[in-house]
Amino acid sequence: MKRIFDLLLASSGLILFIPIILFTALLIRMKLGTPIIFKQQRPGLNGRLFELFKFRTMTDERDETGELLPDHVRLTLLGKLIRKLSLDEFPQLINVIKGEMSLIGPRPLLPEYLALYSDEQAKRHLVKPGITGWAQINGRNSITWEEKFKLDVWYVENQSFILDLKILFLTIKKVVTSHGISNQNHVTMPDFKGNTSHNNQNYPSM
């Protein structure tokens, strides 16, 4: 039932919002250039890697050594607006249609975090990652990593169709109010440094 729900809403969303999607893509092309779509490997169900799609919100500005400048420097006014309205998430509807993601689930993070999770935190990968989730409507990027992972695991252990509907409707409310987009002193979240006393080692290297 969850898969049918994902396919129906993701397909409908791509059709319904195609004017907004195309207009966003045009603005990015004009202001930031190409590529329009940001692609990055992320771990999904059971830690398997897939290619995540998002609209680009940053420039490629680099320092004299060729290293990318900090996120807060490369994030443009247009990028901030796109993130504030969550327009950058629209391309992930393609990930949902492909079956790599769900509409609702723990957000897909970076592959290097896999080896840093505790066994409890690693449970977040027992379900498909989502465009939005329980942690997103309960703090998003304004809470700590530990709080975020507790919320993710709670969702995994309590998931239901009714809960997914609740998360979906509350997500719309969060997008309208733009609550919790940024963490203090960071564009989104600081890097996760892991649990040094009990790192999880259940995932093979990829």
Image (cartoon, helix red, strand yellow):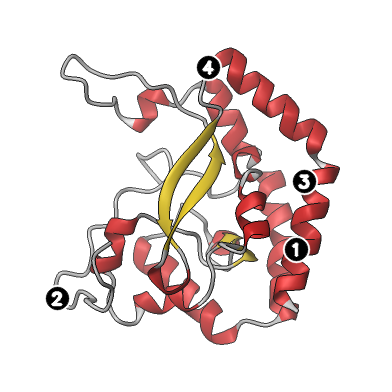
Are the two marked residues, 2 and 3, in contact with CB atoms closer than 8 angstroms?
no
Name the amino acid, label 1. Answer: Leu
Q: CA distance from mark 2 to mark 3?
A: 44 Å
Q: Taking 161 as reference, is 84 above or below it?
A: above
Residue that badge 1 annotates = 7
Q: Quadrant of residue 5?
A: bottom right
Residue 146 at x, y = what percent?
Answer: 35, 68
CA–CA distance between discs 1 and 2? 41 Å
> Which of the two discs, 2 and 3, sits closer to the camera?
3
- Is 6 or 139 nearer to us in this picture? 6
**Callout 4: helix, strand or loop?**
loop
C-alpha gap between disc 2 and disc 4: 44 Å
Q: What is the secondary structure assignment of the residue under circle 3?
A: helix
Q: Residue 203 at what x, y percent from top left?
A: 28, 73
Of pointers 4 and 1, the one earlier in the residue sequence? 1
Q: Residue at x 25, y 71 (%)?
A: 204
| Residue in the foreground of this view, choosing between 46 and 181 | 46
**Mark 3 highlights which residue?**
14
Q: Which residue is mark 4?
A: 33
Disc 1 is placed on an element classified as helix
Q: Is residue 143 left or right of residue 128?
A: left
Looking at the figure, which quarter contains the N terminus? bottom right
- Indicate which disc, 2 or 3, sits on the residue closer to the N terminus: 3
Residue sitting at x 46%, y 59%: 108
Relative placement, left or right, of 143 versus 190 is right
